[in-house]
Amino acid sequence: MRIVIALGGNALLWRGEGPDAELQRANVVRVATAIAPLAHDHDLVLTHGNGPQLGLLAGESAADPALSAPYPLDLLGAQTQGLIGSLLARALRDALPGRRVAALVTHTLVRADDPAFARPTKPVGRPRPSRPAQSLARGRGRQDTGDPGTGRRLVPSPAPERILETESIRELLATGTLVVCSGGGGIPVTEEGGLLHGTEAIVDKDLAAALLAEGVKADFLLILTDVPNVYAHYGTPDQRPVLDVTPAGLREGRYAEGSMGPKTEAAARFVEHTGGLAAIGCLDAAYEIVHGRSGTLVRPDM
């Protein structure tokens, strides 16, 4: 079976942890330990979040007086793919001696006219005072939108149209290689006149994972996070666990846009488009989820 595994942003950094290198090195061992049992019997593609790492690099770039302008998000995203890809590749090689592992820098095509570019919604970096931050951004040649609640920079999140390296990923899988790719939703690029252009945006990692899974003809999309399963009507008196559900049934729950919403939508889309299976659950239960003993299973409507 071919499985695309989407790691949540908490896989390398637990909630509340700072983005220290040693913490990430230690946490990545947990990831490799959870995933290794699946690699013995299945072809695996691994994708991951990059929020804390991207926020760190963006903050450092914005504050660097040696730069005439901060580095654009597409290049910072590429840096995080290399950083996290290296950590994962090394840990997976240690956990799976003799197994081929490749970490691939991956680009995601988005539409230049996507309406999301007019409505920035993705927060980047740490909370900060809004006015000084906006003044700094304008003074250094960047238009910046701040979240009025936290002061965090907000950037557009256009819909993913295509993972440009899909064919290369499929060729690597055919050789038995475990592939790490599409980190942070992929490096967002637009196409004009046959040329690619990086863009100041962040592609939702879960929706990109669903598109990736469809493109590599996966049988199973496994979305791993820090909760055991999806909860419908989360945080209300009507909260209940969702264990076995169709895409239509999954969409009946109320899920927060900033957390479980994109995960449930990604799972529903993959099942609808491919007829395969998707599941959402806890990282440490990855093997049990695939074998039907944990998590929320999303299946086609029979």
Image (cartoon, rainbow, N blue to C red):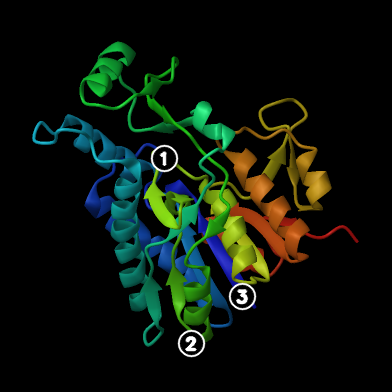
Dot 3 corresponds to which residue?
2
Residue type at mark 2 is: Thr
Residue type at mark 3 is: Arg
- Is residue 106 placed above or below 134 in the rendered structure? below
Q: Earlier in the sequence, mark 3 or mark 2?
A: 3
Label 2 Cα neighbours within 10 Å, binned few <14 / some 14-19 / many ≥20: few
Viewer-nearest of discs 2 and 1 = 2
Q: Position of residue 82 (x, y in %)?
A: 30, 60
Dot 1 corresponds to which residue?
15
- 270 sits left or right of 194 in the view: right
Q: Position of residue 56 (x, y in %)?
A: 27, 39
Looking at this view, name the residue that lies furthest to the right. Answer: 302
Label 3 Cα neighbours within 10 Å, binned few <14 / some 14-19 / many ≥20: some
Label 1 Cα neighbours within 10 Å, binned few <14 / some 14-19 / many ≥20: few
Viewer-nearest of discs 3 and 2 = 2
- Can residue 98 be seen? yes
Image quarter (top left, top right, bottom left or bottom right) of the N terminus = bottom right
Which residue is depicted at the point 35% across and 70% down? 89
> Which quadrant of the figure has residue 290?
bottom right
Identify the mark at residue 175; answer none if there is no mark. Answer: 2
Viewer-nearest of discs 3 and 1 = 3
- Can residue 38 be seen? no
Q: Position of residue 280 (x, y in %)?
A: 64, 53
